[in-house]
Image (cartoon, rainbow, N blue to C red):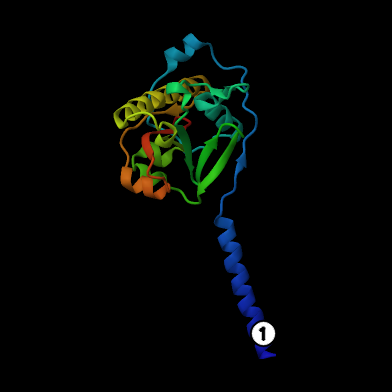
Amino acid sequence: MELKFLFCAICGILMAGTIGFSDEVIKSVQLPAPDKSGGKPLMEVLSKRQSIRNISSKEIPVQVLSNLLWAAFGINRPESGKKTAPSAVNAQEIDIYVAMQKGLYVYNAKNNTLDPVVSKDIRSTANESPAVLSAPVLLIYVADYSRMPKFPQETRDFFSATDTGFISQNVYLFCASEGLATVVMGSFTKERLTKEMNLKKEQKIILIQPVGYPK
């Protein structure tokens, strides 16, 4: 009887441990189809574009997040796979990583999904400024140089920085239209963040950009 009780107790502990572990594993998120209609007129959006660092912790609805990521670097020509922002020789070397409280994902434009990377909140690793710590979404732009094998390093750096600029401006314009707050930041803990994100040696973080509602 005592052995049976001990066996059950051990099984209970193991099951609890297994359940606790599985709860921490994040899964792929299927985003709703982006809403490509509506929005403010272009000239009005340009007049409202600005950097806002006072960002609320209020969550961004998943539909708005889907629209945001599509506007940033989604596929706007399905027949060719080309995107809303240009890239040198169509290398599409920039990946958008999405850091949130629940974990770190990478935006998969082809499948319109958030694919899991790390099951923990890494936002404070990137930068401890109030804008990053309070924003519900932190976009991290990462260049994958393995998609640009024919270019020398200096050219890769130039093109990836330029392409990131196009994407981040798309985010700025979307935020101006949607009433969101955002700011591009070039200050981040490069080595530590690279390690936390499990990046490969061919990958390089270019910029970070917190997004949320203004306070």
- Residue drawn at point x = 48 percent, y = 31 percent: 213
Residue hosting label 1: 5
Quadrant of the image containing the N terminus = bottom right
- Residue drawn at point x = 51 percent, y = 26 percent: 73
Farthest front residue in view: 150
Q: Residues within 10 Å of mark 1 (few under 14, many from 20)?
A: few
Q: Is residue 11 above or below residue 26?
A: below
Q: Quadrant of residue 144?
A: top left
Q: Quadrant of residue 6?
A: bottom right
Q: Is residue 210 above or below residue 125?
A: above
* Residue 141 picture location, percent across and down: 42, 34
Q: Is residue 52 above or below residue 126?
A: above
Farthest top residue in view: 43
Residue type at mark 1? Phe
* Residue 149 picture location, percent across and down: 40, 33
As rendered, which of 165 and 188 lies closer to the eye?
Answer: 165
Q: Is residue 164 above or below residue 117?
A: above
Farthest bottom residue in view: 1
Determine the secondary structure under disc 1. helix
Q: Is residue 60 left or right of residue 54?
A: right
* Residue 45 picture location, percent across and down: 47, 14
How many labels were placed on the picture? Answer: 1
- Residue drawn at point x = 58 percent, y = 25 percent: 81
Quadrant of the image containing the C terminus = top left
> From where the camera sits, is residue 157 visible?
yes
* Residue 70 picture location, percent across and down: 55, 27
